[in-house]
Amino acid sequence: MLNPLPVTLLPPMSDNFHPFFEKMTAAKLPSALIRSFQFYYNQLHAGNTGYIPGSQALPIDNLPQAGEIARYCTSGQGLLGRLAVIKLNGGLGTSMGMEGPKSLLPVKDGLSFLDIIARQVLKLREGNRATLPLLLMNSFSTSRDSLAALSQYPSLANGLPLDFLQHKVPKVRQDSLTPVAWPEDPDKEWCPPGHGDIYLALQTSGLLEILLDRGIEYAFVSNADNLGAIVDTSILGYMASENISFLMEVTERTIADRKGGHLAQSPDGGLLLREIAQCPPGEEESFQDITRYRFFNTNNLWVHLPTLARLLKQYDGVLPLPLIRNSKPVDPTRPTSTPIYQLETAMGLAISLFDNSQAISVPRNRFRPVKKCNDLLALWSDAYVLTDSYRVRLHPARHNGQAPSGDPLVTLDERFYGLIDEMQARFPSGAPSLRYCRSLTVTGDVCFGRDVVIEGDVHICNPATSPRQIADGSRLSGNVILGNQ
């Protein structure tokens, strides 16, 4: 089921694909990328939807636990000189009202994601005398601003580039399966091919060869907006000791993760990842059943680079990852614009290609992304602290029984808090204290004063059409109703 033909067995170029070949060649894109896109376009043209039915994605009940591998910590520390840290940094913060890279958003103590990531790596180098390269997989939209932000850390580069670029591929018209034309904004004729492009982008940039020449054997890959994704030497040591070529960190699914990619196994016992776009119509309820599919992909991946190089050579420069067919309008800001397909892959899908690939169940604190302003407010608050090694941790009170355990659950009314400017306007003095908060829900337009404290489970509701103010120094618990209709 997950064993597509090697790219070396691509049939001769069809008349249908030729317009894509010409468009990509004119854009001076690498030949390996063109072959890769041809591979996926052929599947689309043949009617492949990319769906993986439940009969081919069976549940998994038991996995190794991160707590069981602590004994590998010391051996992993000795391997830090053979590790590279790679962050996926291609995203703009448009969904939160930003115009630039999301990773430049201040998230803790005035530091951005990139500030914290850079300082984490420098601290690890200092404490372990390791080179530990940091690489960003940027998009054309994020590269310049991100590299400018990292210029304040001149020692990061270590003689290596700090980034490599994700490729771009043409969008495909749904009605004719031809390249879409959008003269008013030609950039919208292109899209990124998903983060599964990381493997080919590493090769075409030349960085894979450079890393291998420098003795770098392992890469830890994660999303730049996930501050829980820090180097764990126990996992590194475990991977090396057990000769694992590809290791995926997963965590127990919650209701919040029901639409995210989950781990499953094929009928022959191999591991696979299934994304929501690969769920057949009519199977959505089963896909979202967190008791059936228990494990969620954190997108924290560990890759053995020599094995990756061998696979890329075997497949003539292209890893045949399962297709993800995404339906969208050509202009995302205009829902009625020409319907197109974006042909994508996800990097976690490679788990089905590597020999001796494994998954490991990790604590939830290794998956702490910022997808919405809800997540951002929680991180701004005193429920989290930034350690001397620049790791974001829950406040100690949330571990010793003095405060609710686990992460505070924040739910803000998206009508008023969906964008970063709206957040800053309604929290002009910063986040309220959430150290002793289990959950905070805000309904309606509410502005928070200075030194507000939230305790336990709190629901603040403003049913009025005009904004209401929480006074400075307020201490809130339970249900709080503001204003009148």
Image (spheres, helix red, strand yellow):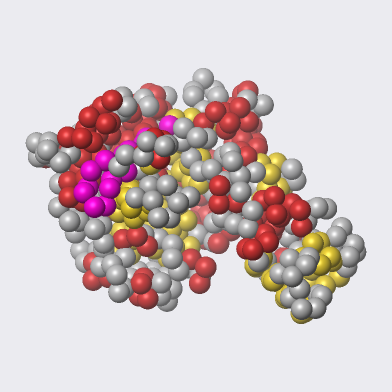
Which residue is more in the foreground, 370 or 209? 370
Q: Position of residue 90 (x, y in %)?
A: 48, 40
Q: Quadrant of residue 195?
A: top left
Q: In x, y percent, where is residue 444?
A: 71, 69
Question: Residue 462 placed where, x, y %?
Answer: 76, 73
Residue 178 seen in this snapshot: yes
The total number of labels drawn is: 0
Q: Residue at x 35, y 43 (%)?
A: 193
Can the viewer see residue 460 in this picture?
A: no
- Relative to residue 160, is residue 249 depicted above or below? below
Instruction: Tell me which segment is drawn in magenta.
Output: 165-179
Please check the rendered image and state whether residue 178 is part of the magenta-colored stretch, yes or no: yes
Apparent side of residue 349 relative to residue 80 in the rendered image (left or right): left
**Position of residue 228 measured from the top left corner of the image (x, y, whole percent):** 58, 52
Image point 42% across, 47% down: which residue? 331
Q: Give the quarter of the image for residue 403.
A: bottom right
